Amino acid sequence: MTDETQGTDQANDPQHRPAPAASAQPADAAGTTASTEAVPDWEKRFRAPRIGLPDWAEDAPDRSLFVSNATGTFELYAWDRATGRQRQATDRPNGTTDGTLSPDGEWIWWFSDTDGDEFGVWMRQPFAGGADEPAAPGLAAAYPAGLAIGRDGTAVVGRSTDDEGSTVHVVPPGQPAVEIYRHRESAGVGDLSHDGSLIAIEHTEHGDAMHSAIRVVRADGSTVAELDDTNGGTEELGLSVMGFAPVDGDARLLVGHQRRGRWEPMIWDPVTGVETPLEIDLPGDVGADWYPDGSALLVEHEYHARSELWRYELGAPGRGAGAAAAEGRALTRVETPAGTVSGATARPDGTVEFLWSSAAQPPEVRSTSGKVVLDPPGMKAPGSVPVTDAWVEGPGGRIHALVQKPEGAGPFPTVFDIHGGPTWHDSDAFASSPAAWVDHGFAVVRVNYRGSTGYGRAWTDALKHRVGLIELEDIAAVREWAVESGLADPERLVLAGGSWGGYLTLLGLGMQPEAWAVGLAAVPVADYVTAYNDEMEALKAMDRTLLGGTPEEVPERFEASSPLTYVDAVRAPVYISAGVNDPRCPIQQVENYVQRLEQRGHPHEVYRYDAGHGSLVVEERIKQVRLELDFARRYVGDTAR
């Protein structure tokens, strides 16, 4: 239910992939020979090969791993930069995107679930190719909760199940797994120190699943130090593990914190207890990762739905960040185009590779060296129209919305495309689904409602105990602005979204029945109580945090926030798509909602597909978008170009 990947268009934005020359490309690439003249632009954007930022082995940086949809399904690919050779490492009907390399580059670890249900085991295969084998023999299937691999081959595996809660196991090479952590609340592996002696665990033992604490333990599970900004649950401040220093014998841990009302990094040494604040004077949220030699940080800065990169010098070992700042050379801009950097990594030679896009321009993997990192085969994705910003006064403060519109004068039929999460945000990044609506004559409005990230801790944390209701207040304020400004036709407003956005769509159709002409809900929460009972344990913990308890403890809050409560008030035709193996928004609670629509004889359509929380198969995604377009146009028409 609370999912930052959302399974829709974001699932089609892969996380890895490269090629130093045109000859270095995945074999059997889709669309390399077939004519594309008759294919509309909106379909080309999905079919064009997509690539992600390459991951690379720490001790063998020429060995990389990436994700691509070159064959029509998102899968993992191995790439030897020294030879230019690439090969497809995984091949499953519903795709594979979760994988990593061992530090020596000898092994590819990848997560094997069943048809997108996210419940499975880690497998591994040799980088050069070969048979897959269980990577952690003896560990039963579970939901993944972090993975770290040491230089001696020891793995630290985080797991989550309904029966066990959260567990962490140490798996030495050729030896049985040893459990070193267990708790009913959600927890996961953050990182493993460079020498393998320390393990960082993010946990929510205090009962607040939105704000983690950090515990550093030894390989036997004994505690070295604890960092907890929640003060036992009395204060809503979170921490996140950004990574141990990439230097042997260096215990420093890069940590994200919220002490000044936003996410920003600091350095914490769990052995000495010393905390080093960093003088990064940038507005908005700030994340960071280490340069490979540990001398600097690669800073990722997000502000008002755009992002940029900086290099932060840490100074000579032992002098700390303050010395570098005093010399006036701490922060240096890494040049990137205006738009969104959705991933970045510093290479051993000091260059930075990053995955960049804007709403108007498709994703590219770029390098500060000026060289082409990746040139995917086949057709190129057509661009789209740029976004403009709208700032609307709302009941909880100024709301940021991103607007795309077709050529011509409004008012337009308008899609309010609501993002999932809820702890996520829409940005000036390329997305195929909004572009498809614009091609068909619709304006598209995306609202970063309260609950979204990127606008400060108070904005993100505002949802508690009035889940769904607060977001709809913000969406209503932006809807009113869109109509009054002449952008949107009030008789042709479409409410749409996936995951949490699908939940808000169904809730909005019932709570604001006169506002919407059509509703399109993908993998939604439809019946909150049934969803809670059927979903994975980690999401139950999140729901208890958001609503303040279980359905038995706070039944009135679950009722007030459940779309099923308002289903009889829905007036707009409803389209729902759902994955039959979805562990986040399980299928039964969708069926409960659909049954109520059927009992009313209310106009609706339901599309069920054999996958989980979204699809990694390109043709399936195209089919889903086509069904949504056809359903909406049937009721509100369009002005297609």
Image: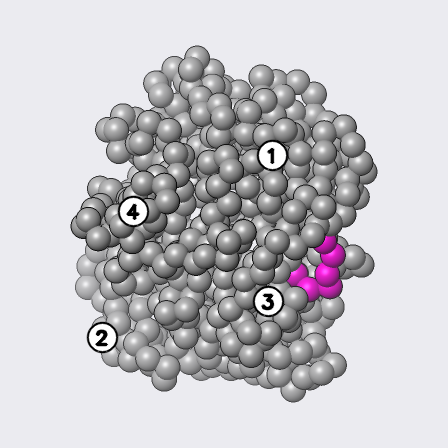
Residue picked out by circle 2: 485
Under circle 4, the secondary element is strand
Name the spot of residue 265 as percent of width and height, x first.
39, 56
Name the spot of residue 331 as percent of width and height, x first.
24, 49
Task: Give the residues in magenta.
Answer: 181-186
Residue 150 numbered mark, or none: 1
Structural distance between the alpha carbons of marks 3 and 4: 31 Å
Q: Residue at x 27, y 63 (%)?
A: 283
Q: Toward which corner of the image does residue 455 lie, by quadrant?
A: bottom left
Name the spot of residue 476 as percent of width and height, x first.
39, 78
Q: Is residue 332 left or right of residue 249?
A: left
Under circle 1, the secondary element is loop
Query: What amino acid does circle 4 point to?
Result: Tyr
Q: Residue at x 42, y 19 (%)?
A: 81
Structural distance between the alpha carbons of marks 2 and 3: 40 Å
Q: How many marks?
A: 4
Q: Nearer the viewer, residue 154 or 305?
A: 154
Q: Toward which corner of the image does residue 459 lie, by quadrant?
A: bottom left
Query: What amino acid does circle 2 point to?
Result: Ser
Residue picked out by circle 4: 312
- The local crowd at label 2, few if under 14, some if 14 to 19, many if 20 or more residues have their Cα within 10 Å, is few
Under circle 2, the secondary element is loop
Q: Nearer the viewer, residue 161 or 36?
A: 161
Structural distance between the alpha carbons of marks 3 and 1: 28 Å
Name the spot of residue 217 as percent of width and height, x first.
64, 51
Residue 573 lies in the magenta-colored region:
no
Closer to the chain start, of discs 3 and 4, is: 3
Verify CB contact (< 8 Å) between mark 3 and mark 4: no
Residue picked out by circle 3: 209
